[in-house]
């Protein structure tokens, strides 16, 4: 197991290098650039942009160099100094911008991910154990409804419902009076009041889909010979389900959890736009739209790191949960 983990970690560096190169190139493939948008904005404000001003902007943003040189400068700064460059749009260091969004993103995503697994695993198991009974039909029906409703539509419905019937705006993570206030118990309580709605909206589709996966996995395991043997030995049904069946049926959920780790950083861009949430998903959307290459490239690189780490953690967790994997 140790050798396997070491080999996987050694593969991280070349994979991240490849991802960073591909993402850096793709970001610049659309026509135009941030500089052209900036010039158009300055001209729209009624001013004329001289060639000297254009040249100064090119030098400031490093756009006077060829793409390969821009990439090498960016990667060298990351490796040697931990410097991810300067954001064009925000005119601040990328590190500062990402950290200002990252805390709220992780808070929303971690809460929604916890809700997903706390609901999906027991409900999926219950549906499998009660196969073709009333409970199974209800849970399956709810899961189909949950998968069919888009997240943004649910967010809009909650937004309208809150304004019309509760006199409460499910927008943002704070009430207007707390946005620029220092942290206090009142501000933390206000954050906790706003947090359940975006977390529940983000968790809806994930919970519905994973319930179906958990139900199918549990049904496969319940049909295995060793489960029938455990029952023939006189073990209680609760022991058979919790100790023998669940341990094997949980494997797909562990794998999916590893792939879900990047969502802790990405958040949901569409939900963030609808509910005005300060997440890095919205930040990535805006940076790609404005071709803010250093900010977008850094966010994509961070998501790639989380995906690799998540897959590694999932593999280790699978080996712990399933002794058969350790023996292979």
Image: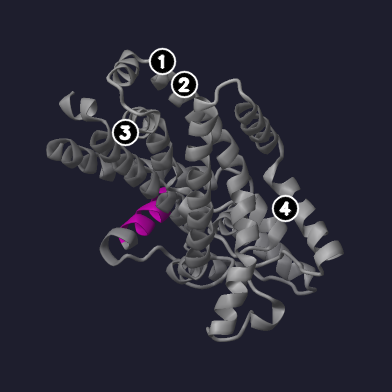
Which quarter of the figure has residue 317? Answer: top left
- Mark 1–mark 4 Cα distance, whole angstroms, equals 40 Å
Which residue lies most toward the left here?
3
| 1 or 4: mark nearer the eye | 1
Vertically, is 283 above or below 148? Answer: below
Tell me if mark 4 has few (under 14), some (14-19) or many (20+) residues whose alpha carbon lies within 10 angstroms of its own.
many
In this figure, which residue is indicated by the disc labeled 4? Answer: 155
Nearer to us: label 2 or label 4: 2
Name the residue tied to disc 1. Answer: 223
Q: Earlier in the sequence, mark 3 or mark 2?
A: 2
Contact (CB < 8 A) between labels 3 and 1?
Answer: no
The answer to whether residue 163 is magenta is no
Q: Which residue is mark 2?
A: 219
Q: Secondary structure at mark 3?
A: helix
Where in the figure is residue 66, as x and y percent of width and height? 45, 51
- Look at the image and tell me whether residue 33 can be seen: no
Residue numbers of the magenta segment = 68-76
3D distance between C-alphas at marks 2 and 4: 33 Å
Q: Which residue is mark 3?
A: 243
Per the model, the C-alpha gap separating discs 3 and 2 is 15 Å
Residue 163 vs residue 16, the one in the foreground: 163
């Amino acid at each position: 197991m140790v050798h396997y983990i070491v080999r996987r970690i050694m593969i991280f560096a070349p994979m991240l290098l490849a991802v960073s190169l591909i993402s850096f190139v793709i970001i610049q493939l659309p026509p135009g650039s941030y500089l052209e948008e900036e010039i158009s904005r300055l001209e729209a404000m009624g001013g004329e942009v001289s060639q000297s001003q254009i040249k100064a902007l090119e030098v400031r943003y490093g756009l006077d160099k060829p793409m390969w040189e821009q990439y090498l400068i960016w990667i060298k700064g990351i490796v040697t100094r931990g410097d991810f460059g300067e954001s064009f749009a925000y005119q601040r260091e990328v590190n500062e911008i990402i950290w200002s969004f990252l805390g709220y993103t992780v808070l929303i995503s971690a809460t929604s991910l916890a809700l997903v697994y706390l609901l999906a695993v027991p409900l999926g198991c219950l549906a499998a154990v009660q196969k073709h009974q009333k409970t199974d039909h209800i849970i399956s029906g709810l899961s189909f409804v949950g998968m069919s409703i888009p997240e943004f539509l649910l967010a809009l419905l909650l937004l309208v419902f809150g304004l019309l019937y509760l006199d409460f705006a499910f927008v943002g993570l704070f009430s207007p009076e707390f946005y620029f206030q220092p942290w206090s118990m009142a501000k933390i309580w206000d954050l906790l009041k706003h947090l359940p709605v975006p977390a529940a909206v983000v968790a809806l589709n994930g919970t519905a889909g994973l319930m179906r996966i958990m139900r199918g996995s549990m049904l496969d395991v319940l049909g295995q010979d060793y489960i029938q043997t455990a029952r023939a030995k006189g073990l209680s049904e609760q022991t058979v389900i919790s100790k023998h069946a669940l341990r094997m049926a949980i494997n797909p959920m562990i794998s999916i959890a590893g792939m879900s780790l990047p969502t802790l950083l990405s958040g949901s861009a569409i939900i963030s736009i609808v509910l005005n949430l300060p997440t890095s998903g919205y930040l990535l959307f805006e940076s790609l739209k404005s071709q803010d290459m250093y900010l977008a490239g850094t966010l994509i690189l961070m998501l790639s790191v989380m995906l690799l780490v998540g897959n590694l953690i999932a593999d280790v967790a699978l080996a712990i949960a399933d002794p058969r994997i350790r023996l292979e």
